Image (spheres, rainbow, N blue to C red):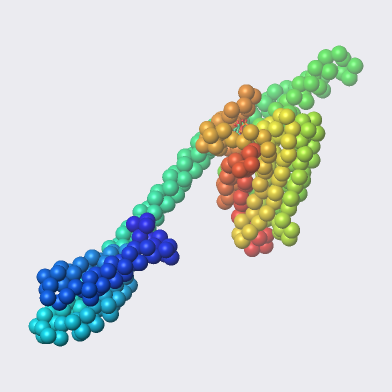
């Protein structure tokens, strides 16, 4: 199949040349054998069918017909020149010429049809395999989203549970604060209490905010400034670890419609992962690009890259290979991408290091 296909698609036509050579050889045998040896001629005549079928087998209709025509051209003069004395035998041979054409054509047509059927089956099998792969990917994604939403529901529940007693504690502390005079040495403890309660409240409301299932502050979002603000936030850490960072932005990128706060959170998670992967220093490159109705931010580093297990499970909540990891960075980034109708793709670069791409639909502002 493979070799026949390659011969048909332009490889050197050895089978064709071999078939022609055989026709020439059989014809020469005809011309050189005295017509008195009728039996030999009858045998030679049948030998023509072999190259004919070879032609049809390798090249289909074209091959079968070409060989039949070549055979006729070489064989006809022999019939006319050498068999004038036996009209019956001559008529028989002329009829055989017609048979060559019929057999060459029929065999070619059948071969072509079989080949087309086989090609059709191959394509159907390929399409099925692709559809199955897509189905599998969709299933994986749904499974992941399901886990994420259960996780979200759990943390929202916890945040709510914490918020109420926190409100009561906060009220009590306020009363304590107002009843503690400024010079009292216990005043300092009350202030610490109040500050820590504020911190807890912020964590709880951020948690509630993040767990909401739809992006709530869609607006024009400049991806470059999202990236720049994340790089500014992390510049100190990068300096300490000897990491060089670059940001390459495709010229002429327009703002996308997105929740800027969440986009920043997602990119921050990716950049932090890259920084953590390059403990001994290295290069971090963030790219911003867009094509058609999609925009993306790519974060790449030259650390060790994703391990095979991390490549498979990296987006799962709580999957981590780091000692102090939470396993939430990538899953939150993925959730944010999904909330925007986009996707998060993780992979490794050929030259080593990880490459993570956050893709979201552009949805130009003003088109809503
Ligand atoms: N830039 C990266 N290079 C190599 N591995 C990475 C990178 N980013 C993420 N990973 C892998 O994916 C895992 C999950 O990442 P994440 O969800 O952010 O959780 P965490 O950072 O808390 O481990 C990491 O533990 C690590 O194995
Ligand atoms: Mg992380």
Residue 204 at x, y percent in the picture? 66, 32
Residue 45 at x, y percent in the picture? 18, 72
Which residue lies most toward the left here?
88
Residue 232 at x, y percent in the picture? 79, 40
Which residue lies most toward the right here?
183
Question: Is 288 placed left or right of 14 in the picture?
Answer: right
User: Eyeballing the image, is 163 above or below 249?
Assistant: above
Q: Is residue 68 visible?
A: no
Q: Residue at x 75, y 47 (%)?
A: 247
Frontmost residue, 334 versus 117: 117
Residue 90 in which image quadrant = bottom left
Frontmost residue, 332 versus 330: 330
User: Eyeballing the image, is 335 above or below 105?
Assistant: above
User: Eyeballing the image, is 55 above or below 311?
Assistant: below
Residue 157 in which image quadrant = top right
How many marks do you count on the picture?
0
Q: Residue at x 22, y 80 (%)?
A: 78
Q: Residue at x 67, y 32 (%)?
A: 277
Q: Residue at x 63, y 59 (%)?
A: 291
Frontmost residue, 148 versus 310: 310
Judged from the image, the quadrant occupied by ligand 1 is top right
User: Eyeballing the image, is 265 above or below 220?
Assistant: above
Frontmost residue, 7 versus 310: 7
Which residue lies most toward the top here?
185
Question: Is 203 placed left or right of 129 in the picture?
Answer: right
Q: Which quadrant holds the C terminus?
A: bottom right
Residue 125 at x, y percent in the picture? 35, 54
């Amino acid at each position: 199949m493979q070799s026949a296909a390659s011969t048909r698609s332009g490889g050197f036509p050895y089978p064709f040349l071999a078939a022609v050579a055989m026709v020439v050889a059989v014809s020469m045998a005809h011309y050189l054998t005295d017509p008195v040896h009728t039996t030999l001629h009858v045998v030679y005549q049948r030998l023509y069918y072999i190259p004919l079928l070879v032609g049809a087998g390798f090249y289909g209709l074209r091959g079968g017909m070409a060989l039949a025509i070549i055979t006729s051209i070489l064989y006809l003069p022999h019939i006319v020149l050498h068999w004038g004395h036996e009209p019956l035998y001559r008529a028989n041979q002329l009829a055989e010429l017609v048979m060559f054409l019929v057999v060459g054509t029929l065999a070619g047509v059948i071969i072509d049809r079989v080949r087309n059927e086989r090609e059709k089956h191959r394509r159907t099998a390929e399409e099925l395999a692709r559809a199955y792969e897509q189905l599998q990917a969709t299933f994986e994604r749904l499974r992941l989203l399901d886990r994420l939403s259960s996780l979200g529901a759990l943390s929202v529940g916890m945040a709510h549970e914490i918020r109420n007693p926190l409100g009561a504690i906060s009220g009590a502390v306020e009363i304590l604060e107002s009843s503690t005079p400024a010079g009292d040495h216990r005043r300092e403890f009350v202030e610490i209490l109040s500050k820590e309660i504020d911190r807890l409240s912020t964590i709880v409301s951020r948690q509630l905010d993040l767990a909401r299932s739809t992006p709530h502050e869609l607006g024009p979002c400049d991806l470059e400034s999202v990236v720049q603000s994340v790089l500014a936030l992390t510049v100190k850490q990068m300096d300490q670890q000897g990491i060089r960072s670059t940001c390459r932005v495709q010229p002429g990128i327009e703002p996308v419609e997105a929740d800027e706060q969440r986009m920043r959170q997602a990119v921050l998670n990716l950049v932090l992962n890259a920084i953590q992967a390059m403990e001994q220093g290295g290069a971090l490159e963030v790219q911003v690009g867009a094509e058609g109705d999609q925009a993306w931010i790519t974060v790449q580093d030259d650390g060790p890259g994703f391990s095979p297990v991390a490549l498979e499970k990296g987006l799962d909540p709580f999957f981590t290979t780091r000692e102090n990891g939470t396993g939430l960075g990538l899953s939150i980034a993925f959730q944010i991408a999904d909330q925007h109708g986009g996707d998060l793709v993780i992979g490794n670069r050929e030259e080593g290091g990880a490459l993570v791409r956050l893709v979201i639909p552009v949805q130009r502002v003003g088109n809503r």
